[in-house]
Image: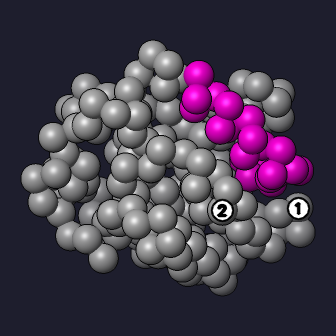
C-alpha cells in the first residue's frame, strides 16, 4: 500500500538500463506520477544532457532537483523518480552524487535496476548513437550499486536490486516491491 505521507520511490540505475520505460509502466499501473531527475534539472537549468551525459555542476543540479521535487510534492504525495547515484563527469570518470540529496528527499523505497553491461551498451548505442567502453559502463554499474547500498543502509530505506529481463516480469517485481506486496530486499 502506498503511504499518505510524502514519498519518493527512487528508480535508479546506469544510463540505458531501462529506468524511463519501466517507470512509465509503473506510473500507469500504480497511478503515481513519474518524473525524471535529469528532466526536472534540465527544465530549470537549461542544461540538456542529450547523448553526452556529462554534467557540469552536479551539486548545483542536485539543489535544483530538491527544489523541483519539493514543489511537485505540494501536489502529489507520492512520486516515482528516475535518477542516478553516480554520473560521468566531463573526463568520463565516475562521479558520486552528493549524499545530501538522498538524505533530503523523502525516500520511501529505492529500486536499483541492473542489466548485463553488453545489453546496456547496445541500448546506449541504439538510443543515443554513442559508444561507451564496456569498462566504463561496468565501473559505473558497480559504483551505482555500491552507492545504492550505502544510501539505503545509511538512511534505512528498503532497497530492491532488480536484474532486468526486459519483460512484464520487471514491472510486476518492481510493482510488488513498491506497493509492499513482496519483492526481494537486498
| x then y, percent, for residue 96 | 71, 68
* Residue at mark 2: 99
| Label 2 residue SS | loop
Residue 80: name its quadrant. Answer: top left
The answer to whether residue 131 of the structure is visible from this angle is no
Q: Residue at x 50, y 72 (%)?
A: 154
* Number of the front mark, 2 or 1: 2
* Residue at mark 1: 90
Is-magenta flag for residue 1?
A: no
| Label 1 residue SS | loop
Q: Which sits in the foreground, 113 or 98?
A: 98
The answer to whether residue 47 of the structure is visible from this angle is yes
Residue 6: name its quadrant. Answer: top left
Residue 29: name its quadrant. Answer: top left
Over which residues does the magenta segment extend? 51-71
| x then y, percent, for residue 100 | 67, 56
Q: Which sits in the foreground, 42 or 49?
A: 42
Residues at badges 2 and 1 in contact (C-beta under 8 Å)? Answer: no
Q: Give the Cα separation between the discs numbered 2 and 1.
A: 20 Å
| x then y, percent, for residue 4 | 27, 30
Among numbered discs 2 and 1, the one appearing first in the sequence: 1
Amino acid at each position: 500500500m502506498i503511504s499518505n505521507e510524502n514519498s519518493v520511490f527512487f528508480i535508479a540505475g546506469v544510463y540505458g538500463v531501462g529506468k524511463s520505460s519501466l517507470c512509465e509502466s509503473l506510473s500507469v499501473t500504480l497511478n503515481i506520477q513519474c518524473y525524471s531527475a535529469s528532466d526536472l534539472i534540465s527544465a530549470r537549468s537549461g542544461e540538456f544532457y542529450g547523448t553526452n551525459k556529462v554534467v557540469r555542476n552536479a551539486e548545483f543540479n542536485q539543489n535544483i532537483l530538491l527544489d523541483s521535487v519539493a514543489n511537485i510534492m505540494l501536489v502529489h504525495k507520492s512520486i516515482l523518480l528516475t535518477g542516478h547515484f553516480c554520473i560521468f563527469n566531463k573526463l568520463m570518470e565516475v562521479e558520486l552524487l552528493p549524499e545530501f540529496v538522498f538524505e533530503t528527499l523523502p525516500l520511501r523505497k529505492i529500486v536499483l535496476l541492473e542489466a548485463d553491461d553488453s545489453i546496456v551498451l547496445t541500448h546506449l548505442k541504439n538510443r543515443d548513437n554513442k559508444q561507451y567502453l564496456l569498462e566504463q559502463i561496468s565501473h559505473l554499474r558497480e559504483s551505482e550499486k555500491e552507492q545504492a547500498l550505502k544510501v539505503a543502509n545509511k538512511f534505512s530505506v528498503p532497497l530492491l536490486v532488480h536484474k532486468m529481463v526486459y519483460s512484464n516480469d520487471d514491472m510486476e517485481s518492481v510493482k510488488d516491491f513498491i506497493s509492499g506486496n513482496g519483492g526481494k530486499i537486498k
